[in-house]
Image (cartoon, coloured by chain):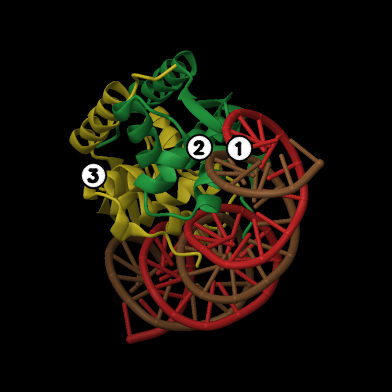
Chain colours: A yellow, B green, C brown, D red
Amino acid sequence: MGVTKTQIFTEQQNDLAQLFKVLGHPARVAILQYISNQNACICNDLVAEIGLAQATISQHLKELKTIGLLKGEVEGKSMCYCIDIERWTAIQKQLNQFFNTTKSNCC
Amino acid sequence: MGVTKTQIFTEQQNDLAQLFKVLGHPARVAILQYISNQNACICNDLVAEIGLAQATISQHLKELKTIGLLKGEVEGKSMCYCIDIERWTAIQKQLNQFFNTTKSNCC
DNA sequence: TTTACATATCGCAATATTACGATATTAAAA
DNA sequence: TTTTAATATCGTAATATTGCGATATGTAAA
């Protein structure tokens, strides 16, 4: 036990849940907001801004990369993590489709 | 360690992450879709439809209730779980606001 | 009231996640 | 080339989540 039974759900359900899951941590929400609002994306700045260790931030960045939300580019000694706008919009669309097709009810 | 450091994030960030987190499991996505598409909401039907034990479904339903997405009504011997449409729409709005205010970028 | 059924809760085992120090890796600067 | 700085990865500890059997609770029927 303790394992999510992925195989009993549809690919669409698993995909959707995966997107929600990655967004389901305040540090990752904060990272996205910081990158967006400050128009800055240097990993080190995130470490300074958010009160988590460098290793932890790096781990969260990696998760955001797995769903394609962030792409990292080498910027001299640093890394610049930027939001992939196309992917961002696509995910928003996917989530909205879920919300729109799942709102009828029984009572 | 292993504890999310809630206190270093804003209430808005924690709230948002909490919503995403609850939606971040395929069983809960499936439950919402089933309730919506079948226009049925009897707990026992969900157990039969989704391949998880009754105790497990009950637990997932509880989590969906914590964010107010579902409300349960007694229906004879059974329980009818329905989507709270107002809350549903409010959550969709909240997520969209996050997406819309977090899409500018640096590079 | 007894019985039967539906759902919730408890307790536990397996696994996943979060966080961080230590250390590797990489790239610019000295 | 050595040093310095930034980031990634590894290993590990603490905690959270998932899932389920067993059992409690509640409700309707017999």
Task: Give the SS element for disc 1.
Answer: loop
Asked if marks 1 and 2 fall on the same chain, the answer is: yes
Give x and y (percent) for residue B34: 34, 35
Residue C5 shown left or right of residue B26 in the figure: right
Residue drawn where x is 30% and y is 31% of the image: A95
**What number is the disc on residue B38?**
none
Q: Are marks 1 and 2 in contact (CB under 8 Å)?
A: yes
Give the residue type at disc 2: Ala
A55 relative to B54, above or below: below
Residue appearing at x 23%, y 44% in the figure: A12
Q: State the residue position of label 3.
A: A12
Residue A71 locus on image (x, y percent): 26, 48
Q: Earlier in the sequence, mark 1 or mark 2?
A: 1
Label 1 lies in what chain?
Answer: B
Q: Position of residue A30 (x, y in %)?
A: 49, 38
Q: Which residue is mark 1?
A: B9
Q: Which residue is nearer to you in this view: C13 or A31?
A: C13
Point out the image quarter for the C terminus of chain A.
Answer: top left
Residue at the spot 33% in from the left edge and 33% down from the top edge: B33
Choose mark 1 or mark 2, whichever is in front.
Answer: 2
Q: Residues within 10 Å of mark 3 (few under 14, many from 20)?
A: few
B69, above or below A63, in the image: above
| Residue furthest left as drawn | A86
Q: Residues within 10 Å of mark 2 (few under 14, many from 20)?
A: many
Query: Which label lies toward us, 3 or 2?
Result: 3
Q: Which residue is mark 2?
A: B17
Residue nearest the observer in this picture, A17 or A46: A17
- Secondary element type, mark 3: helix
